């Protein structure tokens, strides 16, 4: 088990042809954009005060190599599925402040993540829903007790499992990207350099 002072953030990332399949973009652009968004999400975690460890979980070699280059440690889940990836990331951690963040928040600001983590006090884990309020972006608990239920419509399942929702706006944390409309909203907030670079190089 790994003991690290500060928050440990587990970030599952799907790479390759399956990544971000709802984005109506040419496959090469979609793959590059999914990786870029994940790297901007990971970089924001690494830069957040109070975060001691960022764990990227993926079965994609390109994702793992790039994540290590920006300061994350990496884990390969060995089994398909989001829940299995999260479990693999959590498995090497002992009890302590732990969060799961989905890796598709390219506009994430360290200040918004730090604010959310500061609010993660007992009882129960803290939930940050997506901008629409139906999905989940972050689940955090000071003791590392994370009954995760990520996936479509997961906010209600997390609340039913005992999580409490963060009321603060934290717009850059709530704006996950699954569709082109989501990406437009993220661009309005200001995405990170990896995402900007991919979009600048993409065919118009």
Image: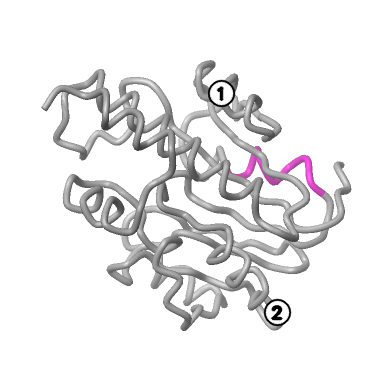
Q: Which mark is residue 34?
A: none
Measured as percent of width and height from the top left, residue 165 is found at 49, 79
Q: What residue span does the magenta drawing correspond to?
A: 86-93
Queried whether the magenta region covers residue 139, the answer comes back as: no
Residue placed at 66% from the left, 74% from the top?
Answer: 120
Measured as percent of width and height from the top left, residue 194 is found at 43, 33
Of the residues tagged 1 and 2, which is closer to the observer?
1
Measured as percent of width and height from the top left, residue 145 is found at 70, 64
On screen, 79 above or below 100?
Answer: above
Q: Report whether 140 appears left or right of 34.
A: right
Per the image, the residue denoted by label 1 is 66
Characterize the magenta stretch by its predominant secondary structure.
helix
Q: Are marks 1 and 2 in contact (CB under 8 Å)?
A: no
In terms of sequence position, does the residue under pointer 1 or pointer 2 come before the other? Answer: 1
Q: Report whether 119 appears left or right of 167.
A: right
Per the image, the residue denoted by label 2 is 121
Q: Based on the displayed image, in which of its 4 quarters is residue 153 positioned?
A: bottom left
Residue placed at 48% from the left, 58% from the top?
Answer: 149
């Amino acid at each position: 088990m790994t003991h690290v002072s500060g928050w440990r953030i587990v970030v599952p990332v799907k790479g390759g042809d399956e990544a971000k399949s709802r984005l109506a973009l040419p496959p090469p652009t979609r793959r590059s954009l999914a990786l870029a968004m994940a790297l901007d999400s990971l970089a924001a975690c690494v830069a957040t005060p109070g975060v001691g460890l960022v764990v990227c979980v993926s079965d994609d070699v390109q994702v793992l190599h790039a994540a290590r280059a920006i300061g994350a440690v990496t884990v390969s889940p060995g089994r398909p599925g989001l829940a299995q990836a999260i479990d693999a990331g959590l498995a090497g951690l002992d009890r302590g402040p732990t969060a799961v963040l989905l890796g598709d928040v390219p506009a994430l600001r360290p200040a918004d993540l730090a604010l959310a983590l500061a609010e993660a006090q007992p009882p129960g884990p803290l939930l940050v829903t997506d901008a629409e309020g139906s999905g989940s972006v972050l689940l955090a608990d000071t003791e590392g007790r994370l009954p995760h239920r990520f996936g479509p419509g997961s906010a209600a399942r997390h609340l039913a499992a005992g999580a409490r929702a963060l009321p603060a706006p934290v717009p850059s944390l709530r704006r996950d990207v699954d569709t082109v409309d989501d990406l437009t909203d993220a661009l309005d907030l200001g995405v990170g350099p990896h995402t900007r670079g991919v979009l600048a190089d993409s065919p118009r």
